[in-house]
Image: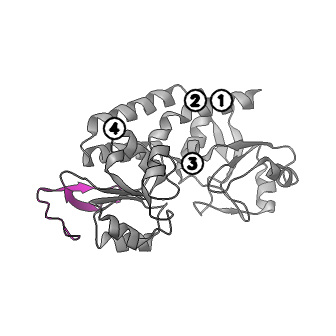
């Protein structure tokens, strides 16, 4: 191993970017750079093996309070990670900075996910279950998620919807995103599905032209609040505006067990 381990019995695993990585058969020291995947690893029973997380890995709180934080998802400290001497690093194509991930890959085994749909999320969980010899637990979580998503009763009529993730500039999502997949499952018609950018910048003129019936303001990455309703109502006076929990729409690990019940409450609100 490049960081001084004498481990034998290296095993090869393929990540969602189609990279092959070689890791010790027993992985003792994990650094996770993705909040939703940190939570999933803990739910697999691996919290004791996690040595480093990001400052955004807030679930579960026991992990957040006790593990070394290596920085953010885009600006983690390579030196802090070096001192943690990980056997494996868990990353994500979109959430982490490509240049920094490539630096880490030159030194450590880095397993990278690429999640743009519920199917991709299930695949990620299944693969990580295999990496950590937690296949049965991973399958149990996947089955719970599938069962709960089957219970969603989507809107009777699709509603033209804009989902905002950022302000100044306003930013939404196109059809090549995990959030879009979640919107579709509820019965929302994403106004900016066909944008060329995955996270298009939306001007007031574009929003006015799209004329959404519903506007969803996410709690993350930008922390939208009710005080932002007024400026949006000035552009789309007829739209119904809701604050939504961004974790339910964008976390693609075991948090997905909870998402369908949350979506059903939102559907009920819209029906009122």
| Residue situated in front as seen by the camera: 194 or 133 | 133
Instruction: Check disc 2 and report the residue beneath it.
Output: 261
Determine the CA span between mark 2 and mark 4: 21 Å
Determine the CA span between mark 2 and mark 3: 16 Å
* Residue 54 on image: x %, y %: 47, 59
Determine the CA span between mark 3 and mark 1: 17 Å
**Label 3 element class:** helix
Quadrant for the N terminus, please.
bottom left
Query: Between tags 3 and 1, which lies in front?
Result: 1
Whichever of callouts 2 and 3 sits on the residue coming sooner in the sequence is: 3
**Label 4 element class:** helix
The residue at the point 21 percent across, 71 percent down is 2
Determine the CA span between mark 4 and mark 1: 27 Å
* Number of the label disc, if any, that sits on residue 194: none
The residue at the point 86 percent across, 43 percent down is 238
In screen coordinates, is 265 left or right of 96?
Answer: right
- Tell me how many marks there are: 4
Q: Range of the magenta residues?
A: 1-24
Magenta highlight on residue 119: no
| Residue situated in front as seen by the camera: 41 or 126 | 41
Quadrant for the C terminus, please.
top right
In screen coordinates, is 89 left or right of 210?
Answer: left
Q: Compared to 46, does 17 lie above or below?
A: below
4 and 1 marks in contact (CB < 8 Å): no
The residue at the point 11 percent across, 56 percent down is 9
Instruction: Check disc 4 and report the residue beneath it.
Output: 138
Whichever of callouts 4 and 3 sits on the residue coming sooner in the sequence is: 4
Whichever of callouts 2 and 4 sits on the residue coming sooner in the sequence is: 4
Instruction: Check disc 3 and report the residue beneath it.
Output: 179
Magenta highlight on residue 4: yes
1 and 2 marks in contact (CB < 8 Å): yes
Instruction: Check disc 1 and report the residue beneath it.
Output: 265
């Amino acid at each position: 191993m490049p960081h001084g381990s004498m481990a034998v019995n290296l095993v090869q695993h393929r990540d969602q970017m189609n990279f092959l990585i070689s890791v010790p058969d027993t992985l003792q020291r994990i650094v996770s750079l993705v909040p939703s995947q940190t939570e999933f690893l803990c739910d697999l029973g691996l919290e004791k093996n996690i040595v480093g997380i990001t400052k955004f890995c807030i679930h579960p709180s026991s992990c957040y309070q006790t593990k070394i934080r290596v920085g953010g998802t885009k600006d983690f400290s390579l030196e802090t990670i070096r001192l943690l001497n990980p056997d494996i690093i868990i990353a994500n194509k979109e959430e982490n900075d490509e240049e920094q991930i490539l630096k880490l890959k030159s030194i450590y085994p880095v397993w990278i996910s690429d999640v743009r749909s519920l199917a991709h999320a299930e695949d990620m969980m299944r693969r990580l279950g295999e990496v950590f010899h937690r296949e049965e637990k991973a399958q149990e979580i996947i089955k719970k998620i599938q069962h709960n998503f089957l219970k969603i009763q989507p809107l009777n009529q699709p509603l033209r919807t804009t989902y905002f993730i950022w302000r100044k500039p306003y930013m939404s999502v196109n059809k090549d995103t995990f959030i879009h997949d979640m919107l579709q499952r509820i019965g929302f018609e994403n106004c900016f599905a066909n944008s060329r950018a995955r996270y298009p910048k939306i001007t007031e003129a574009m929003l006015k032209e799209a004329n959404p019936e519903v506007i969803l303001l996410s709690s993350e990455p930008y922390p939208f609040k009710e005080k932002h309703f007024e400026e949006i109502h000035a552009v789309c006076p007829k739209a119904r505006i809701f604050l939504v929990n961004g974790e339910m729409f964008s976390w693609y690990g075991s948090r997905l067990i909870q998402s369908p019940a949350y979506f059903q409450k939102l559907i009920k609100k819209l029906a009122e």
